[in-house]
Amino acid sequence: MDRCCVDNDICSLRNVRERAKFKIQEGIVRGFREFLQIQGFTEIHTPKIVARGAEGGSNVFKLDYFNKKAELGQSPQFYKQTMVGVFDRVFEVAPVFRAEKHNTTRHLNEYVGLDFEMGYIDGFEDVMAMETGFLQYTMALLAKDYQKELDMLGVKLPDVSRIPAVRFDQAKELVAEK
């Protein structure tokens, strides 16, 4: 085998099982976009090189940006909230950067965030209903259009017909009982 292939994983990514992972990721992002567009959301694209992070409390990747201080964006939150004043409902699919040390392979410093923001909601139930709808839509889409890849990887989609919810005060009581 060519040494370049071994060192760079290029050959392994041509394997159908490896490619299946990317196809399933495509399906999840596709489901997110389609569902939110059906619900009247507008897709936006926010800056990733920013003067200051939008969230406090976590470390940032600092940059020298043409002799000025800058950071990689931790979240599109500030921009989403701003754009809700323009469109009422917005979403973004984009990279998010977190400069946090970790000791697990399940924690990423860079990942693709699926973010949405809604204005004029009555309560957290509105947000939960949107999340539930997205999960139901996306699981149905994966089962319909990505079954070959799911079977290849032995993935069984979760049942999202009803997602349980626990109020915060009830959760505290359950934890206290344990």
Image: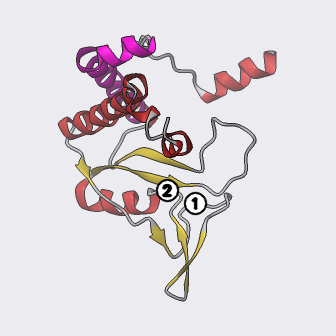
What segment is highlighted magenta in the picture? 127-155
Total numbered labels placed on residues in the image: 2
**Colouring rule applied to residues:** secondary structure
Looking at the rendered structure, the kind of residue marked 1 is Glu
In depth, the one of 58 and 98 nearer the eye is 98
**Which residue occupies 52% across, 20% down?**
165
From where the camera sits, is residue 177 visible? Answer: yes
- Residue to which mark 2 is pinned: 75
- Residue 37 appears in which quarter of the rendering? top left
- Residue to which mark 1 is pinned: 55
> Which part of the image, by quadrant, shows the C terminus?
top right
In depth, the one of 178 and 30 nearer the eye is 30
User: Any magenta on residue 142?
Assistant: yes
**Which residue occupies 75% across, 21% down?**
175
Q: Are marks 1 and 2 in contact (CB under 8 Å)?
A: yes
Give the SS element for disc 2: loop
Give the SS element for disc 1: loop
From where the camera sits, is residue 161 visible? Answer: no
The spot of residue 176 in percent (x, y) is 80, 21
